[in-house]
Image (cartoon, grey):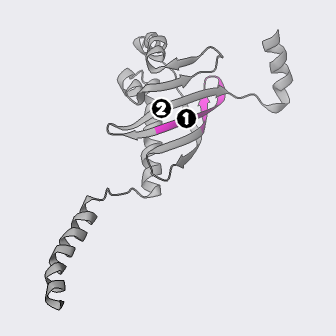
Amino acid sequence: MKNKLYALLPLLFVLMTSCVQNEKPQQSTTELEQTLNTFLDDWHRAAAKADYEGYFGKIAEDGIYIGTDVTEHWTKTEFEGFSKPYFDRGKAWDFTAKERNLFVSKEGNIVWFDEVLDTWMGDCRTSGVLENTKEGWKIKHYQLSVTVPNEKIQQFIDLIDG
């Protein structure tokens, strides 16, 4: 019996080693946060440079973009159509993150975030969802909102009810 157990040890070693080698290496939280922040910052910079491929290449094919106007609920294709004239002129929009919060799923393949952006409209608040696909991180959902200070909300309501 003892000899049979010793004969199985090399097999057990091979099995354990192959299991360990097949595990996908995990990024540390700090590395993942750095990756995600770079991804989002590069996405914003692509718009500022009117880099059409750099911008739309980061949005998933089934991605959704929600703009500041109540009518702005776009699929990727619709948003590309709306945005192309701006990119073709060489001037899209220039948004810079001032603050960002990232939240990662247990599996590490879904991230949701919110950020405060410095824009031509003043501070805007955004939220979004990213998915790690075989092509890398992609934006699945993004919503851009204009912020209104609480002390000015009545003026804002009066303005839009006009």
The residue that appears at 38% across and 21% down in the rendered structure is 52
* Residue 140, percent from left and from top: 48, 32
Q: Is residue 53 left or right of residue 111?
A: left
- Identify the secondary structure beneath mark 1: strand
Image quarter in which the N terminus is found: bottom left
Q: Which of the 4 image quarters holds residue 113?
A: top right
Q: Which of the 4 image quarters holds residue 4?
A: bottom left
Q: Residue 135 versus residue 126: which sits nearer the camera?
A: 135
Q: Are marks 1 and 2 in contact (CB under 8 Å)?
A: yes
Span shown in magenta:
115-130
Quickly name the residue at label 2: 140
38 lies above or below 19? above
Q: Is residue 116 magenta?
A: yes
Tag shown at residue 57? none
The three-letter amino acid code for the residue at tag 1 is Gly
How many marks can you see? Answer: 2
The residue that appears at 46% across and 27% down in the rendered structure is 63
Image quarter in which the C terminus is found: top right
| Magenta span main SS | strand
Distance CA(mark 1)–CA(mark 2): 7 Å
The residue that appears at 46% across and 24% down in the rendered structure is 47
The three-letter amino acid code for the residue at tag 2 is Lys
Quickly name the residue at label 1: 128
Residue most extreme to the bottom:
2
Earlier-in-chain disc, 1 versus 2: 1
140 lies above or below 2? above
Q: Residues within 10 Å of mark 1 (few under 14, many from 20)?
A: some
Q: Residue 48 versus residue 20: which sits nearer the camera?
A: 20
* Residue 5, percent from left and from top: 19, 84
Q: Is residue 145 magenta?
A: no
